[in-house]
Amino acid sequence: MKALLINPAIYDFAAYDLWMKPLGFLSAARLLLQNGWKVDYFDFLDRHYPGMTTRSNQFGCGKFLQEEVTKPVCYQGIPRRYRRFGLPAEVFRLFLKGLARPDLILITSGMTYWYPGVKEAI
């Protein structure tokens, strides 16, 4: 059995990697592996993805890759820039091309209002 686990991009006004890892999600991946599953994992928030690295401070924290995007209508009155944080969608598409079709796909989200990243991954 094959599983694909995805930690999607974040759409928000700000995001910074302070050891931000989806522990519960990674624990689920470990359980799958322990039960004989082949697990592929894609983390849009991987700041050390080959060819896409960003600088880290002495503690390993740092900024995510980011791009400014159009604010949703409900945020139009907020005088701040709205961004998509994470690896480009094209990197994800290339990753998927190298995979066999999974039997199970799991997607996580750190915050409910980060749903645009989940929707994008789907």
Image: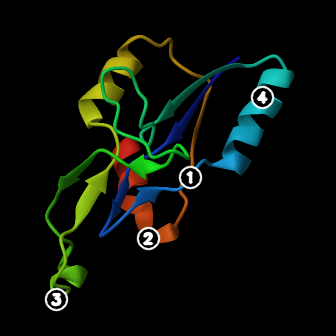
Marks 4 and 1 close (CB-CB < 8 Å)? no
Q: Quadrant of the N terminus?
A: top right
How far is disc 2 from disc 3 in space, using C-alphas?
17 Å
Q: Secondary structure at mark 1?
A: loop
Q: Indicate the amino acid at tag 4.
A: Leu
Mark carried by residue 72? none
How far is disc 3 from disc 1 in space, using C-alphas?
29 Å
Mark carried by residue 20? 1
Q: Which residue is mark 3?
A: 77
Mark carried by residue 113? 2
- Reading the chain from its start, which is encountered first: label 4 or label 2? 4
Q: Residue at x 16, y 89 (%)?
A: 77
Estimate the x, y position of residue 118 in percent, counting from the top left: 43, 52
Relative to 2, residue 122 above or below: below
Local crowd size for mark 1, using a 10 Å CA cut-off: few (<14), some (14–19), many (≥20):
few
Left or right: 55, with 101 as reference point: left
Q: Secondary structure at mark 4?
A: helix
How far is disc 4 from disc 2 in space, using C-alphas?
28 Å
Q: Indicate the amino acid at tag 2.
A: Tyr
- Reading the chain from its start, which is encountered first: label 4 or label 1? 1
**Can you tell which of label 1 and label 2 is closer to the viewer?**
1
Count of numbered marks: 4
Identify which residue, 108 or 59, lies in the foreground: 59
Q: Residue at x 47, y 13 (%)?
A: 99
Q: Which residue is mark 4?
A: 32
Identify which residue, 22 or 113, lies in the foreground: 22
- Reading the chain from its start, which is encountered first: label 2 or label 3? 3
Q: Secondary structure at mark 2?
A: helix
- Reading the chain from its start, which is encountered first: label 3 or label 1? 1
